[in-house]
Amino acid sequence: MAVYTDVSEDQLKSFLTEYDVGTLLSCKGIAEGVENSNFLLKTTTGFYILTLYEKRVAAADLPFFLGLMDHLSQNGLSCPLPIPRLDGESLGELAGRPAAMVSFLDGAWLRKPQAIHCREVGRAMAEMHVAGADFQIRRENALTVGNWRPLWDGSRTRADEVQPGLRAEIDQALSDLELHWPQGLPEGVIHADLFPDNVFFIEDSLSGLIDFYFACNDFLAYDVAICLNAWCFEPDGAFNLTKGMALIDGYQSVRPLSAAEAEALPVLSRGAALRFFLTRLHDWLTTPEGALVVKKDPLEYLRKLRFHRQIGSSVEYGLRRKDMVS
Amino acid sequence: MAVYTDVSEDQLKSFLTEYDVGTLLSCKGIAEGVENSNFLLKTTTGFYILTLYEKRVAAADLPFFLGLMDHLSQNGLSCPLPIPRLDGESLGELAGRPAAMVSFLDGAWLRKPQAIHCREVGRAMAEMHVAGADFQIRRENALTVGNWRPLWDGSRTRADEVQPGLRAEIDQALSDLELHWPQGLPEGVIHADLFPDNVFFIEDSLSGLIDFYFACNDFLAYDVAICLNAWCFEPDGAFNLTKGMALIDGYQSVRPLSAAEAEALPVLSRGAALRFFLTRLHDWLTTPEGALVVKKDPLEYLRKLRFHRQIGSSVEYGLRRKDMVS
């Protein structure tokens, strides 16, 4: 839940004079997202989401994020569309923070996604990869293999407080990934955080993707690996092969994976598990007890990492055997 | 901010089959209110607020609260209208909690209300008092003079931790109020929590009142005293006489205060200050440090109580001198 910054009526009114959106009728803080402050605005012209970017999002990256949403929308992907200001810019300032308005997207995120939803997510992710192909701004992934060691160094000495033996296990897993991380796979713009709370559905149909604030340029198949981690494990830790198959099939119905990508899924999935493990561990160790944030358990991702270590081939994730032939 | 209970898509879908509101298009947790879990729903028929009543609201009181909103709406007051279920009831159950849907009310609450807004609040409060006159269900005020001593007894021994000397000062103030609390003033249904976050405005016009979960039968003028506390002090603790005048004038434009009510405003205002002081002090001393709730400072209401102690006549709150003649 997240409203970090409250906004007064004068600040908001003055902000809205920069837009052609009519008169304000309602403004409610939304208890979703953990990075920014979000408000649902109703005006005489419709509903909008107003986002104030808090310090965890680098202001220099905002033209990439907003430009990407604009580009993807214009290329047919259903995602929030930045509302231009009267001066043509997407980005303004409110309560001392960078701020933007985007269109309101129908749909709600699923607390208990099923295999049919995993297929839809796979398909939409591939459509995003295709639609993003000719986006002109680049943003390096700040949370990929080269960034994990500095992140780990910040938590390493306290890791055994969380679970005895954790330090040695992650030392080993990280060295292994640094050594075996793939090279030369197809690259493009990835979402990089396509968890269930960032995918909206109306009944069983996917209605859109949101929250592009981790999007970056990286291996497209790494996005698939992130989704295998985020969508295909059950609450008890079991990997659901039916969901894995649905997700990969949905993806390949739009963009077939190359043989090299198919081959790389296990190492990419280990990497994705380690990436979320490391940021959660960092937050776990550094978030003060009284903070108004729900801390996410890093050990969920340790268990996923261990699962991926015993995977022999992508067939075990649900890739069809015929697609494994190189 | 408050979403205490999360709701799964299956639970919500099943809940909505009890209503004639169309298909669900969106559901977002709202970061407002501290007693209940609130969601903004969009369906094919419009926008609604869904409330799950958490344990601080007694289930036995819900027919009073929902019936009151219905009654007030039908008598021309702008407030949320409970949406009837297919079986005609207003109250259902969701995620193991009593739950209800009400209409979406345009407007936003003011972070920095001015005197013109105080006048509107006074007027709307009086309209509520008039509209509630023939409401048939009764609910005793669980937070009036007779309830303060047990509440105080729960905090008394630890009061000096919050501020040295607090125990003796409140002992004295409470005994004084118990002795001098008025009797026989006009009674009716009062809102009893009409703070700025429960009053919506569109630009400078009041668009409605919300959150009737403290409403009860009590002296009508006690509601005025609560509003003098809630609306007419500045952040630095100063009483703003212009706002007081506007609030009282607005009220009297619909329902003139009797001489006895006018006379009683200082003691009622001390009582209102003590009531909010006591519940805030209780929460301050009992809310665990890590809870996802912003604790409100009880000392704000100690300062207001001290202010009211030096008031000689209601003219000092902004009552016109001519209205003081009995």
Image (cartoon, coloured by chain):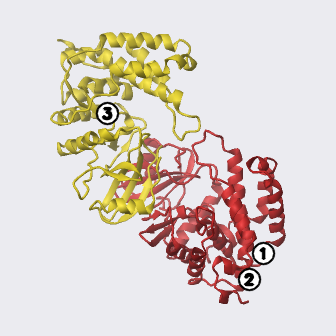
Chain colours: A red, B yellow
Circle 3 or circle 1, nearest the eye:
1
Neighbor class of circle 2 (other Cα within 10 Å; few <14, some 14-19, many 20+) is some
Amino acid type of the residue that numbered disc 2 sits on in the rendered structure: Ala
Q: Position of residue A85 (x, y in %)?
A: 48, 58
Above or below for A235 versus B209: below
The residue depicted at 19 percent of the width and 35 percent of the height is B132
Instruction: Say if mark 3 contacts mark 1, CB within 8 Å.
Output: no
Residue at the outermost left position = B134
Q: Is mark 1 on a helix, strand or loop?
A: loop
Which one is nearer the viewer's eye here, B85 or B321? B85
Q: How far apart are marks 3 and 1 (CA)?
A: 66 Å
Q: Is mark 3 on a helix, strand or loop?
A: helix
Amino acid type of the residue that numbered disc 1 sits on in the rendered structure: Pro
Q: Kindly identify which chain the residue marked by label 2 belongs to.
A: A
The residue depicted at 54 percent of the width and 57 percent of the height is A91
Q: Position of residue A62 (x, y in %)?
A: 61, 59
Q: Where is residue B183 in the image (x, y as percent from the top left)?
A: 23, 15
The residue that label 1 is drawn on is A182
Asked if residue A230 shows in the view, the reply is yes
Instruction: Work out whether disc 2 and disc 3 sit on a shared chain.
Output: no
The residue that label 2 is drawn on is A260
**Label total for image:** 3
Q: Kindly identify which chain the residue marked by label 3 belongs to.
A: B
Above or below for B151 versus A73: above
Above or below for A184 versus A192: below
Instruction: Say if mark 2 contacts mark 1, CB within 8 Å.
Output: yes
Q: Kindly identify which chain the residue marked by label 1 belongs to.
A: A
The quarter in which the C terminus of chain B is drawn is top left
Left or right relative to B97: residue B281: right
Neighbor class of circle 1 (other Cα within 10 Å; few <14, some 14-19, many 20+) is some
Asked if residue A17 shows in the view, the reply is no
